[in-house]
Image (tube, rainbow, N blue to C red):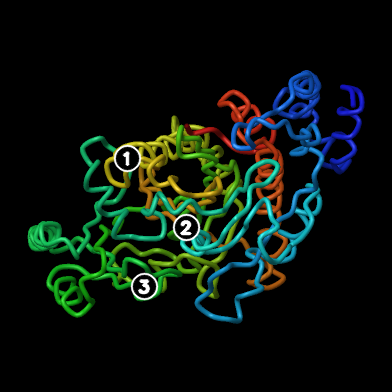
């Protein structure tokens, strides 16, 4: 076995389409070409581990982590409904992207390198004896930043860091007596201010009520304590068709220690089908929505940027607004996270896998185009064909390039057992081409 053989075998294991896209990283130490010379050099020293009584064993094949085929599992270990047991998160185009990146699967059982599921599987995985891989196992969902998916935890985080100035809407965890009393005082002081009441663990805008003054207090009393009250944005930006809207953006956290977070450069705009009239009574249908419906359309993010850049807003160009959004998200991910959720190193203790998070972020813009982060989604909708033919092409154009790059990043990351920070950043920079590094 020599360096030439190593390089040839390594390159032969990678699909041509993926090789063309990943050529820069394949020519790096992290990618494996220069790495082969190190592998050959290692063969000069036999391995005689002490646990084998000092007896030398035949070394494993050089470059196993690059020569072995990767496998992925798309089936959850634990589901709330048996009909979801063999449902792939995102559907058919997800399988296509894993296949294009050289993965075998989706497989059942524990013979996998990447686990891709809609809901976190951490608790189920801790009950399973996962054997070591040639590289390392990667799991979608770290179950660390629990402010994603839990509005109560997000409200607690927002309140703890409000003084540091993150762009968020004031939120109150109504389970917390101190926050409940603080919110009740605000309601009485500002009776014309609307509030969005929602369950902590609800999704798809289910169970939401928009109330103000005494109606808000009465609604909260019957709503249940495991809920939050979030200030309603009274003066949204209406220069995009005169309708209320919010942005659905996508964050990839490749690591929590040290933190590496990347914002996808594209996204969606969810816009109401109804003209927004400031003095009309607030409606949960017109004013609180989170997905496509008969009342809500999905538009490309580029449509909004084109309006901003052609409307003569002065410094409020798309580039300026995008910068404010990035800063708001950066603040929420960094300010107070360890104090609220502990160190990630402690969370990771005892786990036999590495992890990443693909989060959804819902962002509002006020009349001065200042962003406010409404919430994070732990498992944003990745399907492209669940809203009919009308929206399928549009959703595919946004989500497919994103998934393609996430899967290519996962492929190279899963092949490296203990990458250095330099190698990790190189893999990220060489694969996440349509992402902006936040941290």
Towards the viewer: 274 or 374: 374
Q: Which residue is mark 3?
A: 284
Q: Residue at x 50, y 64 (%)?
A: 124
- Mark 1 falls on what kind of element? helix
Residue 102, given in percent of the width and then of the height, sits at 81, 48
Choose the circle earlier in sequence order: 2 or 3: 3
Q: Are marks 2 and 3 in contact (CB under 8 Å)?
A: no
Image coordinates for residue 435, horizontal then vertical, percent: 60, 38
User: Which disc, if any, is residue 395?
Assistant: none
**Image position of 138 with respect to 95: above or below:** above
Q: Residue at x 39, y 55 (%)?
A: 375
Name the residue at 19% across, 68% down.
Answer: 212
Q: Nearer the viewer, mark 1 or mark 2?
A: 1
Query: What is the CA distance from the residue labelled 2 to the residue labelled 3?
Result: 23 Å
Q: Which residue is mark 1?
A: 338
Question: Closer to us: mark 2 or mark 3?
Answer: 2
Closest to the camera, between mark 1 and mark 3, is: 1
Badge 2: how crowded within 10 Å, few (<14), some, or many (20+)?
A: many
Residue labelled with disc 2:
378
Marks 1 & 3, CB-CB < 8 Å contact? no
**Dividing the picture into quarters, in which one does residue 116 lie?**
bottom right
């Amino acid at each position: 076995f020599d360096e030439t053989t190593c390089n040839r075998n390594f390159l032969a294991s990678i699909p041509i389409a993926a090789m063309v896209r990943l050529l820069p990283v394949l020519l790096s130490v992290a990618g494996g070409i220069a790495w082969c010379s190190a592998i050959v050099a290692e063969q000069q020293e036999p391995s005689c581990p002490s646990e084998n009584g000092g007896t030398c064993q035949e070394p494993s094949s050089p470059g196993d982590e690059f020569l072995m085929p990767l496998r992925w599992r798309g089936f959850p270990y634990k589901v709330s409904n048996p009909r979801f047991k063999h449902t792939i998160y995102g559907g058919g185009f997800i399988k296509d992207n894993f296949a294009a990146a050289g993965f075998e699967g989706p497989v059942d059982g524990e013979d996998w390198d990447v686990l891709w599921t809609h809901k976190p599987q951490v608790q189920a995985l801790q009950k399973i004896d996962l054997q070591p891989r040639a590289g390392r196992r990667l799991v979608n969902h770290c179950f660390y930043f629990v402010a994603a998916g839990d509005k109560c935890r997000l409200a607690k985080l927002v309140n703890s860091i409000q003084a540091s100035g993150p762009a968020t809407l004031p939120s109150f965890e109504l389970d917390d007596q101190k926050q409940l009393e603080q919110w009740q005082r605000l309601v009485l002081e500002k009776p014309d201010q609307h509030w969005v009441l929602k369950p902590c663990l609800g999704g798809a805008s289910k169970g939401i009520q928009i109330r103000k003054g005494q109606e808000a207090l009465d609604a909260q009393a019957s709503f249940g304590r495991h809920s939050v009250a979030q200030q309603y944005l009274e003066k949204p930006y209406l220069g995009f068709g005169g309708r209320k809207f919010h942005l659905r953006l996508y964050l990839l956290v490749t690591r929590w220690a040290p933190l590496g977070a990347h914002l996808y450069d594209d996204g969606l705009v969810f816009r109401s089908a109804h003209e927004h009239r400031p003095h009309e009574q607030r409606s949960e249908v017109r004013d609180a929505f989170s997905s496509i419906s008969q009342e809500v359309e999905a538009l490309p993010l580029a449509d909004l940027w084109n309006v901003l850049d052609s409307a003569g807003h002065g410094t409020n160009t798309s580039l300026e607004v995008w910068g404010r959004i990035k800063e708001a998200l950066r603040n929420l991910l960094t300010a107070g996270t360890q104090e609220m959720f502990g160190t990630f190193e402690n969370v990771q203790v005892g786990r036999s896998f590495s992890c990443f998070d693909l989060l959804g972020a819902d962002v509002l813009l006020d009349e001065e185009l200042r962003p406010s982060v409404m919430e994070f989604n732990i498992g944003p909708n990745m399907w492209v064909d669940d809203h009919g033919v009308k929206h399928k092409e549009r959703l595919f154009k946004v989500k497919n390039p994103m998934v393609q790059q996430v899967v290519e990043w996962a492929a190279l990351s899963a092949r490296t057992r203990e990458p250095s920070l330099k190698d990790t950043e190189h893999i990220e920079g060489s694969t996440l081409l349509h992402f902006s590094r936040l941290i």
